[in-house]
Amino acid sequence: GENVEQHPSTLSVQEGDSAVIKCTYSDSASNYFPWYKQELGKRPQLIIDIRSNVGEKKDQRIAVTLNKTAKHFSLHITETQPEDSAVYFCAPMGSNFGNEKLTFGTGTRLTIIP
Amino acid sequence: DTGVSQDPRHKITKRGQNVTFRCDPISEHNRLYWYRQTLGQGPEFLTYFQNEAQLEKSRLLSDRFSAERPKGSFSTLEIQRTEQGDSAMYLCASSSTQRTLGYEQYFGPGTRLTVT
């Protein structure tokens, strides 16, 4: 099965600075790469995703980059705000359409320091 | 609310009892997933359905667990003879296989199970 690791496991960033979280996966057949944000006591929410035929995708302050050869993808958050504090999970998937099972990473707890 | 809903939100039960959870997906979604999340960990896949057909089950899903989606709409997850190790958040998600609706999985609020 898919082996998924995230680094770092915890990250503290000054408000306004950037944060980068890296996800490494093992299954070379993975074709869909989403990032989920989970606030304390709440459901995971999809914040951005990318498919294997794209190297980078950006949505306002959030971006995802993919290196399929090296089997890793990263979440980039710029101009961080206190509401970005949460646990972030990557969840690579074998389907190109994102509608099969997700294999979640170990999670990264991001804390934004005001 | 047109999102994924789950019921109950919290369940406390004694070891050895049976429990059943319900998930109502987004109405246009034909795929429904169950995940389990323990404290400090990411969600782990349990099983998923396309319409009423159960397409995959994880090895995590022991014989005490059973899931159904009889009419291809809501789903139930039953745990028989609960054990303390079953204590977790049980999350449901749904998605569509239609390109026009997007393929992303959307999660419900979860059912938190505590086995005493």
Image: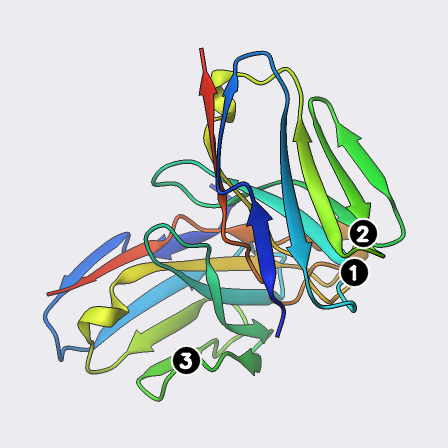
Where is mark 2, residue-wise? A51
- For the point 30% across and 85% down, the residue is B64
Going by the numbered disc 3, the residue's amino acid type is Leu
Disc 2 packing (10 Å; few <14; some 14–19; many ≥20): many
Check the residue under mark 3 and report the chain it is in: B
Quadrant of the image occupied by residue B76: bottom left
In percent of width and height, residue A95 lies at 75, 66
Instruction: Provide the residue designation for mark 3.
Output: B61
Q: Which of B92 and A76 lies nearest the eye of the viewer?
A: A76
Left/right placement of residue A113 relative to residue B104 reads left
Q: Secondary structure at mark 2?
A: strand
Residue type, label 1: Asn
Please say if the residues under marks 1 and 2 sit with CB atoms less than 8 Å apart: yes
Give the label on residue B62, or none.
none
Q: CA distance from mark 1 to mark 2?
A: 6 Å
Looking at the rendered structure, the kind of residue marked 2 is Arg
Q: Tell me the distance, in whole angstroms, between the alpha carbons under discs 3 and 1.
A: 26 Å
Please give left or right for residue A40 compared with residue B108 in the image.
left
Side of B53 where A106 appears, left or right: left
Which mark identifies residue A31? Answer: 1
